[in-house]
């Protein structure tokens, strides 16, 4: 259902900190023009922790309107409250999104049984295909392969965004689940290795600026052109590294502003990038011909 290069969309702000709705539409058009496979508004890259529910729903509306059925929209509706995640997912469904990205609950630190029940409840009641999002570095909990195996038989649990950074774990998910669940990379720099152990695509930060290059890498791999895929992987390695010099989405929004996208600043507690890291990022962008 969801595969290829999926962008974890940044949320653009105006100078006063309000949503820049016109810019959201421009960004969506950028991705439609460059072959992005799907769009995720209100993920971590979209600064979801500092967006109100009203703002999230408005972003879903804008993206759905602008996409107009041409590619899937996967709404970031996961929170650390199961009830709130269900309610937001139901509202997103009414707006017309195609799926829900549901993060492992952060701070609560649920057990594997609690994680299983959480995702089952959202899948049962939310009314949308669910993409599980496992990112232990952000949440302090790791969804284990045996738990994914329990979940993958649910008809509404269709994919997992895996950002554990553990290729052995990701390979084990594929061994246990096969094609019952689509594995998507949640780590840009590991996309090619994850494809090699059964992945079908990526939910990407880098795709905000290089969706066409990521598409080319995935398509080369799928066509059996491993040398071509590896060449693009190496070309993008410095970018993937530098986009995580500081907490995401600080570097990607900084890069986009350097490139003229004018996506604005951040909401506290996120703040501007340090001058030294910004200079390093700009050099990498220049080496790729992006600035």
Image (cartoon, grey):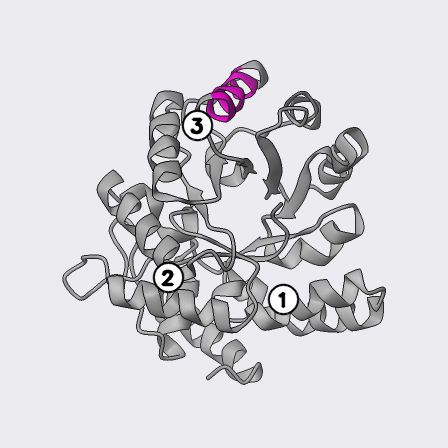
Front of the two marks 3 and 1: 3
Circle 1 sits in a helix, a strand or a loop, which is it?
helix
Q: What is the CA distance from the residue labelled 3 to the residue labelled 2?
A: 23 Å
Q: Which residue is mark 3?
A: 126
Q: What is the crowding at mark 2: few (fewer than 14 residues within 10 Å), some, or many (at least 20)?
A: some
Let me know if residue 76 is in the magenta part.
no
Specify few, some or many for label 1: CA neighbours under 10 Å numbering under 14, 14-19, or 20 or more: many
The residue under the point 42% across, 60% down is: 67
Decide: few, some or many residues near mark 3? Use Cα within 10 Å; few <14, some 14-19, many ≥20: many
Query: Vertical placement of 147 versus 55: above or below?
Result: above
Residue 97 locus on image (x, y percent): 43, 45
- Of the numbered discs in the image, which one, if any, rests on residue 96? none
**x, y percent for residue 141:** 53, 28
115 in the magenta segment:
yes
Question: Circle 2 sits on which residue?
Answer: 66
Q: Main secondary structure of the magenta part?
A: helix
User: What residue is at 75 percent from the left and 73 percent from the top?
Assistant: 231
Disc 1 versus disc 2: distance between alpha carbons? 22 Å
Per the image, label 3 sits on a secondary structure element best described as loop
Q: Earlier in the sequence, mark 3 or mark 1?
A: 3
Image position, residue 192 (x, y; %): 72, 58
Residue 174: image quadrant is top right
Query: Do residues under tags 1 and 2 come within 8 Å of each other at their CB atoms?
Result: no
Please give the range of residues in magenta. Answer: 114-124
Residue 130 vs residue 229, the one in the foreground? 130
Give the left or right position of residue 271, taking residue 204 as reference. Answer: left
- Residue 230, image quadrant: bottom right
Secondary structure of the residue carrying numbered label 2: helix
Residue closest to the eye, 27 or 110: 27
Q: Earlier in the sequence, mark 1 or mark 2?
A: 2
Is residue 237 visible from the viewing direction of this image? no
> If the image is split into quadrants, where does the N terminus sit?
top right
């Amino acid at each position: 259902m969801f595969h290829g290069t999926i962008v974890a969309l940044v949320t653009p702000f105006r100078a006063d900190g309000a949503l820049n709705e016109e810019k959201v539409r421009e960004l969506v058009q950028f991705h439609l023009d460059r072959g992005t496979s799907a769009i995720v508004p209100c993920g971590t890259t979209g600064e979801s922790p500092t967006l109100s529910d009203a703002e999230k729903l408005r972003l879903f509306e804008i993206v759905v309107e602008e996409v107009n059925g041409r590619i899937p929209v996967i709404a970031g509706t996961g929170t650390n409250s199961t009830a709130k995640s269900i309610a937001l997912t139901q509202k997103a469904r009414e707006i017309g999104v195609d799926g829900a990205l549901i993060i492992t609950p952060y701070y609560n630190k649920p057990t594997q049984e609690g994680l299983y029940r959480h995702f089952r409840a959202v899948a049962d009641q939310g009314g949308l295909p669910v993409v599980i999002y496992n990112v232990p570095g952000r949440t302090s909990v790791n969804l284990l392969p045996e738990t994914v195996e329990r979940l993958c038989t649910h008809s509404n649990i269709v994919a997992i965004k895996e950002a554990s950074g553990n290729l052995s774990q990701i390979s084990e998910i594929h061994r246990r689940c096969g094609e019952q669940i689509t594995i998507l990379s949640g780590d840009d720099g590991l996309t090619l290795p994850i494809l090699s152990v059964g992945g079908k695509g990526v939910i990407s930060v880098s795709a905000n600026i290089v969706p066409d290059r990521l598409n080319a890498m995935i398509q080369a791999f799928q066509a059996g052109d491993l040398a071509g895929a590896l060449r693009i992987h190496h070309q993008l390695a410095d970018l993937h590294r530098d986009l995580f010099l500081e907490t995401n989405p600080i570097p990607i929004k900084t890069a986009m502003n350097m490139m003229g996208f004018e996506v604005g600043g951040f909401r506290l507690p996120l703040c501007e990038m340090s001058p030294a890291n910004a200079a390093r990022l700009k050099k990498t962008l220049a080496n790729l011909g992006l600035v």
